[in-house]
């Protein structure tokens, strides 16, 4: 174990779901939420074997710990380890100044990346980066991102651009359109303005997208996700709206060789790669720093869909 003195914590939509009890899973109670913590190693457990040193900048992520010995862990799928512990769900998380975490799973943060900028990368960034890797595409492929102006989405747009994809952003409102445009993305579809499928087809030479990465928090985004894919296209499921299903017509899915992929956070290496891209300047988080005590109000704004980008809490 390691004790981390937290400087900042991002606020993720997952934290809101946990707070509201939206998921059919049992979490620890009482519970300190949060899983996007950026801080410094303050102490290392007496019997811990670790490469860490006191004062090292590290990230506290959703995946707090795993056994590292089972088949899933050996294959790099630590998040599906049956013994996995989760910050802000089964163990206390990052909405506090001091957090106990696990030496093999805290992520080193590059020293040239500001801590407040690193915090949202530790979940939102890692999650969308891993989801984009799941596509297995090539430079120039069209990737549709529903929820593009949100906390996950604005990072997904940038990682997709850094990976060479042509991004088609879907969201609503002038603020989110402006945010997406600031990343150099020209194709923005307002889902309240006309038929989304027709607009995607128009933007993809009539063929449809190679992939859709659904990061939206609302269930409506999943209804159209398969409709604008080209043959051999993939839908990657990331956002977790309550009581939502994706329906695929079997004949069309087989005929077009469509793929439906669930993507659940990233592993330890994904986290390092996602932070390196941010440190290199290829990805930047749009965020506002607020006081830790503002968290209830942040949740209210998040639930109302009034946040563009990310909120980072000052934990000091």
Image (cartoon, grey):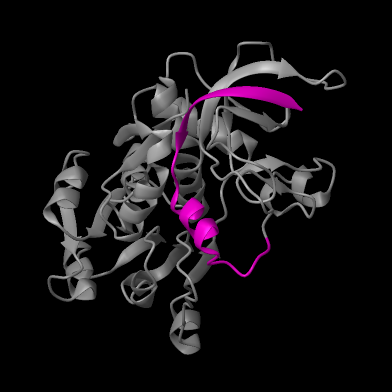
Residue at the spot x=29%, y=34% of the render? 288
Examine the rendered structure and indicate whether residue 271 appears above or below residue 302. above
Q: Position of residue 170 (x, y in %)?
A: 25, 60
Indicate whether 257 appears above or below 293.
below
Looking at the rendering, in which quadrant would you find the N terminus? Answer: top right
As drawn, which residue projects farthest toward the right? 47
Identify which residue, 234 or 56, lies in the foreground: 56
Q: Which residues are magenta?
A: 1-26
Q: Position of residue 58 (x, y in %)?
A: 58, 23
Please name the residue shown 51% across and 46% down the image. Answer: 130
Foreground residue among 82 and 14:
14
Residue 194, quarter of picture: bottom left
Spot occupied by residue 48 in the image (x, y as percentages of width and height): 83, 22
Above or below 61: residue 227: below
Name the residue at 29% across, 68% down.
208
Indicate whether 189 appears above or below 309. Answer: below
Quarter of image, res 102: top right
Relative side of 142 to 177, left or right: right
């Amino acid at each position: 174990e390691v004790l981390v003195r937290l400087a900042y914590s991002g606020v993720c939509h997952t934290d809101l779901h946990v707070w509201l009890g939206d998921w059919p899973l049992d979490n620890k109670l009482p519970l300190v939420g949060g899983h996007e913590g950026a801080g410094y190693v303050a102490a290392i457990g007496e019997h811990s074997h670790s490469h860490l040193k006191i004062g090292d900048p590290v990230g506290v992520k959703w995946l707090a710990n795993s056994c590292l010995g089972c088949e899933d862990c050996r294959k790099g799928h630590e998040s599906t380890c049956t013994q996995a512990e989760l910050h802000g769900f089964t163990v206390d998380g990052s909405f506090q100044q001091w957090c106990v975490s696990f030496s093999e799973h805290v992520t080193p943060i590059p020293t040239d990346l500001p801590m407040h900028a690193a915090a949202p990368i530790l979940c939102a960034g890692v999650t969308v980066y891993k989801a984009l890797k799941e596509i297995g595409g090539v430079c120039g492929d069209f990737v549709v991102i529903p929820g593009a102006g949100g906390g996950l989405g604005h990072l997904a747009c940038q990682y997709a651009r850094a990976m060479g994809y042509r991004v088609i952003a879907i969201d609503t409102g002038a603020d989110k359109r402006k945010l997406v445009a600031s990343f150099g993305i020209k194709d923005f579809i307002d889902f309240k303005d006309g038929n989304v499928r027709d607009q995607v087809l128009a933007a993809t030479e009539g063929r449809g997208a190679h992939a859709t990465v659904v990061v939206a928090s609302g269930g409506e985004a999943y209804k159209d996700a398969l409709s604008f894919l080209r043959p051999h296209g993939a839908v990657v499921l990331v956002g977790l709206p309550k009581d939502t299903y994706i329906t695929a017509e079997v004949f069309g899915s087989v005929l077009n060789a469509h793929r439906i992929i669930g993507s659940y956070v990233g592993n330890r290496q994904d986290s390092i790669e996602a932070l390196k891209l941010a440190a290199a300047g290829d990805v930047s988080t749009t965020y506002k720093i607020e006081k830790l005590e503002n968290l209830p109000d942040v949740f209210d704004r998040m639930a109302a869909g009034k946040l563009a980008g990310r909120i980072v809490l000052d934990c000091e």
